[in-house]
Amino acid sequence: MPALVLLGAQWGDEGKGKATDLLGGSVDYVVRYQGGNNAGHTVVVGDQKYALHLLPSGILSPGCTPVIGNGVVVDPSVLLSELSGLNERGVDTSKLLISGNAHIITPYNVTVDKVTERFLGKRKIGTTGRGIGPTYADKINRVGIRVQDLYDESILTQKVEAALDVKNQLLTKLYNRRAIAVGQVVEELLGYAEQIKPYVADTVLVLNKALDEDKVVLFEGGQGTLLDIDHGTYPFVTSSNPTAGGACTGAGVGPTRISRVIGILKAYTTRVGAGPFPTELFDEDGEALRRIGGERGVTTGRDRRCGWFDAVIARYATRVNGLTDFFLTKLDVLTGWEQIPVCVAYEIDGKRVEELPYSQTDFHHAKPVYEMLPGWSEDISKAKSFSDLPKNAQAYVKALEEMSGAPISAIGVGPGRDETIEINSFL
C-alpha cells in the first residue's frame, strides 16, 4: 500500500513543498489533509518560483491529481485566485479535486478572527487573520458551512443564519462592530458555487479506490508538528492536526493504509508567530540565518524567528508521528560557520531534560544545552551524493540523524528542484 504522509517536524516552514515536489513525478495523488490558506509552500521549478497557500504542491506535477481533503478549510476567493494565477502561468489545474465535506471559510469567519486577535492585545496568539480558527470552531460547534452546502441555497441560508445569530451578538455588543447581513454572505458564497463545482468530488471514495489499485498517494501536511492543536506548543498552535494522525481523519483513510511517514526538518530551526522557542537567536547568527535562508513567511510575509537545530523537538516529532524517515532541508544555509551549535537537551530549573516537557510552563523556561559541531566553508549546492559533501557536513548530518531517532533519507542543498541529495528512496 504505497501511502505516504509528509509533514513538518518543527514549527512549519521546513520546506515541505520542495519535498512534495521531489516526489511528485512518482506520485499519483497529492492530498492536503488539514489547514487552510494559513500555510504556504514555495516550490522552485527551473527558474520559476511558485508560492502556494491552499493548493497541494502536486498541482505542479503533470500526471498527478491534487486533492483538497475533508479536513481542510477552504477560502473560495483564495482558491480561485490561486487557480487563476497558475492557469495564467500555463499550469494545468483541471485535475484538482475538492472534498464536498471540506468546510468553507466565510467572510464572517475572517472578521471574527481579526477582531478577536486585536481584542486580545498582548495575549494575542499570532494568527494569520485568515479566518482559519473561527472556521474550525464553527465546525466543532456544528454551525459550519461545507462545500456541498453551496449547492443547496435553502440549507446554506439556514446555516448562515444559525452561525450569525451568535456572531452578530458578539460583533455588535462586545467588539462594537456592525452586524453582518445573512443575505450578503449567502449571495457571496453562491457566487463561487459554479466556479468550484467542476472540482468537487467524494474524495474519500476516490482515495480509497486509488489505494486499492496500488496507486501512490502522498498526504501533505501544512504547518508542523509543534503547531498541532493537540501535540504542539498550545495555545500558540494552529487549529488542526498537522501530525500524521491528521492524515487519516482529514482525508478519510484508515491508519493501516499508511506505509511511510516522512518528517521534514530544517538544518536549523525557525518559527513564525508567538510562543516559546528555546534555541531562538537574537544576535548576528540569528540575523545571518534569516538573511541567508530567506526566512520570510510565504503566506504571512512575516520574518521568521531563527535559531539553531533543536534535537529535542526532532525526537518528539519522531515519537508522536511514528516517523520512518527525515528529509533534511537547507543544509546549504549553514555553510560558512566555523562551529555550529546543536541543542541536545534543555536545562529547566537547574536540571538537564532530554525530552520535550509536557508542561507549558517548563517549556517556556527551557534553556538550550548545546553541543558544538565543526562547520564547513565549501559550497555544497552542487553536491549530488552524500559523499560529495565536505566531511564536516557529513558528520553534521549523521549527528542530527542519531539525535533525532529516524534515518535522514534526503538532504536539500539548495532551493532548486534538482538541488537535493537522495540517500534512500521514499518509494
Image: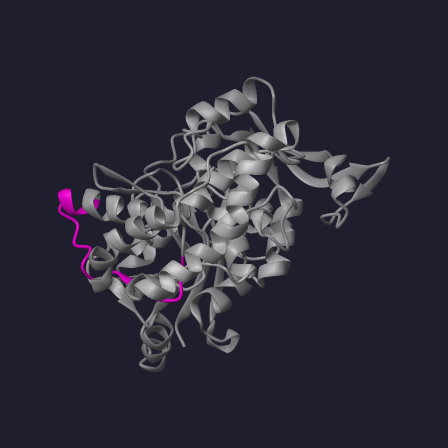
**Residue 237 relative to residue 353: left or right:** left
Above or below, comparing residue 250 to residue 42 in the picture:
below
Q: Seen from this angle, which residue lies furthest bottom?
A: 212
Above or below, comparing residue 130 to residue 121 in the picture:
below
* Image position, residue 401 (x, y; %): 57, 50
**335, 69: nearer the viewer:** 69
**332, 24: nearer the viewer:** 24
Question: Which residue does the image show at 35% across and 82% down from the upper left?
Answer: 212
**Residue 121 relative to residue 49: left or right:** right
Q: Would residue 159 be visible to someone looking at this image?
A: yes
Above or below, comparing residue 163 to residue 360 in the picture:
below
Quadrant occupied by the N terminus: bottom left
Q: Seen from this angle, which residue lies furthest right?
A: 350
Magenta segment's dominant SS is: loop
Question: Which residue does the image show at 64% across and 52% down from the upper left?
Answer: 315
* Image position, residue 192 (x, y; %): 25, 53
Q: Seen from this angle, which residue lies furthest top?
A: 284
How many numbered marks does the figure carry? 0
**Residue 364 relative to residue 351: left or right:** left
Quadrant occupied by the C terminus: bottom left
Asked which quadrant contains residue 82, the reply is top left
* Image position, residue 246 (x, y; %): 52, 62
* Image position, residue 75 (x, y; %): 36, 49
**186, 132: nearer the viewer:** 186
Question: Which residue does the image show at 17% across and 49% down from the upper left?
Answer: 91
**What is the magenta range?**
86-103
Q: Is residue 95 magenta?
A: yes
Q: Does the magenta stretch include residue 167?
A: no
**Residue 382 relative to residue 173: left or right:** left
